[in-house]
Amino acid sequence: MFVCLGNICRSPAAEGILRSMAAEEGLSERLGIDSAGTYGGHRGDLPDPRMRSAAARRGYSLTHRARQVCEEDFERFDLIVTMDDMNYETLHRLAPSREAARRIFRMTEFCRRHPDRTYVPDPYYEGREGFELVLDMLEDGCRGILEYLEQSEKA
Ligand code: 4NP
């Protein structure tokens, strides 16, 4: 599960990208992929139109409806992947146990082509380049997640 603040830009885009990559690799049946926000103010909304059109240009259709993170998410998902420090810290505060907190990661931990980035920047108040950078980072991170899952399966 991917987590950002509003669940209308970064995390639903990551969800759509991983869904598409998983489908290409024949993994759709085996992976439960979702996203949520730490802030619930956009609940029920489709992703931001700027993100939907930037993603569509790369072939990703984003249809997720925004929702807020809830405690059950810590039981349902093996990997909880946050976009920035604020999401990472909020999720640690919400985690019901230390065991659950060990499932919280940062998206940049999975990025291979953006070694200097420690967070995925919030594009909400940015221009078009902001959205393109976010999509580049999310594609990079999603590839990293698939590799990580493949390695964990072998171990
Ligand atoms: P996201 O972007 O966390 O990537 O979905 C944002 C969306 C909405 C707001 C902030 C960030 N907002 O303040 O409403």
Image (cartoon, helix red, strand yellow):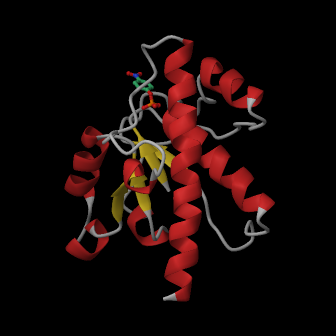
Q: Quadrant of ligand 1?
A: top left
Q: With 121 as the anchor, is 62 left or right in this view?
A: right
Residue 21: quarter of image = bottom right
Q: Is residue 70 above or below residue 147?
A: above
Q: Which residue occupies 68% across, 30% down?
A: 55
Q: Which residue occupies 74% across, 32% down?
A: 58
> Of residues 66 and 110, which is closer to you in this image?
110
Q: Is residue 82 above or below residue 121?
A: below
Q: With 155 as the anchor, is 116 left or right in this view?
A: left
Q: Residue furthest bottom?
A: 155
Q: Which residue occupies 41% across, 59% down?
A: 80
Q: Which residue occupies 70% across, 36% down?
A: 62
Q: Position of residue 32 (x, y in %)?
A: 62, 65
Q: Position of residue 3 (x, y in %)?
A: 43, 46
Q: Is residue 135 above or below residue 98?
A: above
Residue 28: quarter of image = bottom right
Is residue 34 visible to us here?
no
Is residue 119 visible to us here?
yes
Q: Position of residue 52 (x, y in %)?
A: 67, 26
Q: With 43 as the anchor, is 15 left or right in this view?
A: right
